Image: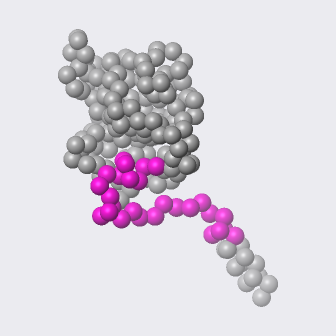
Amino acid sequence: MNRLFAAIALLAASVLGAPAQAGSFDCSVVFDEFDSLMNKNFLVKPGEYTRVVEGKLSRADYNSGQKGKLLLTPNREGMGVAILKTNTGAWGKFLFTWGGRGDALGNPLLILRDVTLFGDVENGDRPRITREIRISTGGRVDIDRGLADEGAQADIWFHNIDGKTMFIEAVNGAALSFPMETLCR
């Protein structure tokens, strides 16, 4: 009998001590998962809610792995989604795309849209939204300030190897996570 109680106690302790798992989201009530579902705990630990790629993402990996998988409004379809921790510790998210008209030399741009940083991600306090940041080939940007920065304050680097092979990458201690599947299950 004592073994039965010990087994039950061990089972209860393992269940109660287990980390919470993400449940299914009913996306019939959601217009855009970037706006509605990617907040608070998701920003801090996106890998607990969906499969992510960490650190950097190539344009080819985006096209084959993320493009078209997330529920986005029609004006955002075809955009990438990234979750960010800046090198100063701010949490945020942004949409991105490669292209546009390019720079003066015709090189592609990395365009970040709806860059949202939270002063306090737990409470949703003081979100700051930057509508658009354009990064030239080889450019780096400090997301905290929304400015180009080639130094140690930069969070993101856009490198373009040959006009077709391009990467978006976290630098200087910043972190990027790219959700590769929808939260809607």
Q: Position of residue 99 (x, y in %)?
A: 24, 27
- Up the image or down, 172 lies above or below 32; here it is above
Tell me which corner region of the image, top left, top right, bottom left or bottom right, holds residue 53.
Answer: top left
Q: Is residue 9 visible?
A: yes
Up the image or down, 46 lies above or below 96; here it is below
Residue at the image position 23 percent from the left and 20 percent from the top: 102
The residue most toward the right is 2
Describe residue 126's horizontal placement relative to residue 76 as left or right: right
Q: Residue at x 77, y 88 (%)?
A: 1
| In the depicted structure, whether residue 130 falls above or below residue 177 | above
On screen, residue 103 versus residue 159, left or right, reads left
Which residue is at the front of the view, 67 or 161?
67
User: Magenta region: which residues?
Assistant: 13-39
Q: Residue, x 37% and y 17% (percent of image)?
A: 138
115 lies left or right of 21: left
- Quarter-wise, where is residue 19 in the image? bottom right
The residue lying at 51 percent from left, 15 percent from top is 151
Number of numbered tags placed on the structure image: 0
Image coordinates of residue 127 in percent, x first then y, are 47, 40
Q: Is residue 60 magenta?
A: no
The spot of residue 118 in percent (x, y) is: 50, 40
Q: Quadrant of the C terminus?
A: bottom left
